[in-house]
Amino acid sequence: MMEITMTTMLKDNPTVAISAATTKLNKLINDHLSNLPKNGDIVKAQILKSGRKEILVDIPGFTTGVIRGREVKNLPLEYQHLEPGTTIEAMVTDTENENGQMELSLQAALVETAWRFVKEKEERQEVIDIKINGANKGGLLASIKGMTAFLPVSQLIPEHYPHVEGGDKKRILKKLKDFVGKVLTVKIISSNPEEEKIIISEKKAWEETQKLKILNFKVGQIITVNIKSITHFGAFVKFDDNLEGLVHVSQIPRAGDPDKLAEPLEIRQELPARIIDIKGSRVFFSLKNLTEPIDQITPTEETAPEIAEE
């Protein structure tokens, strides 16, 4: 069988051969053009030259790009000394400027990438660790990929909630400022790129872990607890593998009770306590009636109260 080559086609039918070649070339050009980055696309670029006024990059397979002006002047610290050959991500802001280069924005790409990270963590309800860098009367402030996130007071775990008699705002703020510099585990519960708002919750992250571990315990069980903090409505305790619970003031023996405590409760004190109720991620304890069988103890609303946010 004779093989049909371009040479054969040109010899036998030059018009058909040229038409076929043109069609193939047009397809290659159209395929290339359809893959060209558009305004708003994130592209990978390789540093060619980095200067004070502009950064030249190569966008493999396409063209040369440039980052310049305020973009270069206001670069984050980790991007201020980019070496040739370093690969970065940047957003296309103009497919062709006056010099025939693709205009790029590194900061826009960082923001876009950060929001993708936030949305992914929010949708998957994954926990992340954040470092507190500020506080106001409403809660705590942190940074997620360079963007500000807000942790409302109501979303702190019970142990971290600033219980202050009379709700004195100055004292509450003072307690909140103690968290600056500390790392907390949180979940992102809402985000809005248009309003540049990210709301995070320590409580949601804590509840998930707490619920799983609590499955190993049951009402009526007597275990050793450690006093973590004391408030006007009771004492927060820790037990087992860093789990937390509450001994309501009504479940702390008073003077005259047959099972009264030998000494007042103190921080870090260890003592036995009975689990009297489990509500979701909350475990409630009693220091009373530790010798009585659980079926002889009649639960009341007072034994496992809801913790009201102050």
Image (cartoon, rainbow, N blue to C red):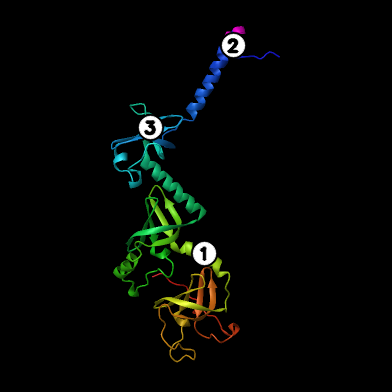
Query: How far apart are the alpha carbons under marks 3 and 1?
Result: 47 Å
Residue flagged by tag 3: what amino acid is it? Gly
Determine which residue is flagged by label 1. Answer: 209
In magenta segment, residue 25? no
The spot of residue 33 in percent (x, y) is 47, 27
Residue flagged by tag 2: what amino acid is it? Thr
Relative placement, left or right, of 12 versus 244 is: right
Quarter placement of the C terminus:
bottom left
The spot of residue 17 in percent (x, y) is 58, 12
Residue at 45% of width from left, 47% of height from top?
116
Front position in the image: 298 or 92 = 92
Residue flagged by tag 1: what amino acid is it? Thr
Determine which residue is flagged by label 3. Answer: 65
Quarter placement of the N terminus:
top right
Image quadrant assignment for residue 16: top right
Q: Residues within 10 Å of mark 3 (few under 14, many from 20)?
A: many
The answer to whether mark 1 and mark 2 are in CB contact below 8 A is: no
The answer to whether mark 3 and mark 1 are in CB contact below 8 A is: no
Determine which residue is flagged by label 2. Answer: 7
Q: Secondary structure at mark 2?
A: helix
The spot of residue 306 in percent (x, y) is 47, 73
Residue at 49% of width from left, 77% of height from top?
225
Front position in the image: 144 or 165 = 144
Relative placement, left or right, of 53 versus 274 is: left
Q: Sequence order check: which comes first, mark 3 or mark 2?
A: 2
Q: Which residues are magenta?
A: 11-15
Image quadrant assignment for residue 5: top right
Query: How far apart are the alpha carbons under marks 3 and 2?
Result: 40 Å
Query: How far apart are the alpha carbons under marks 1 and 2?
Result: 73 Å
Residue 83 visible to an observer of this rendering: yes
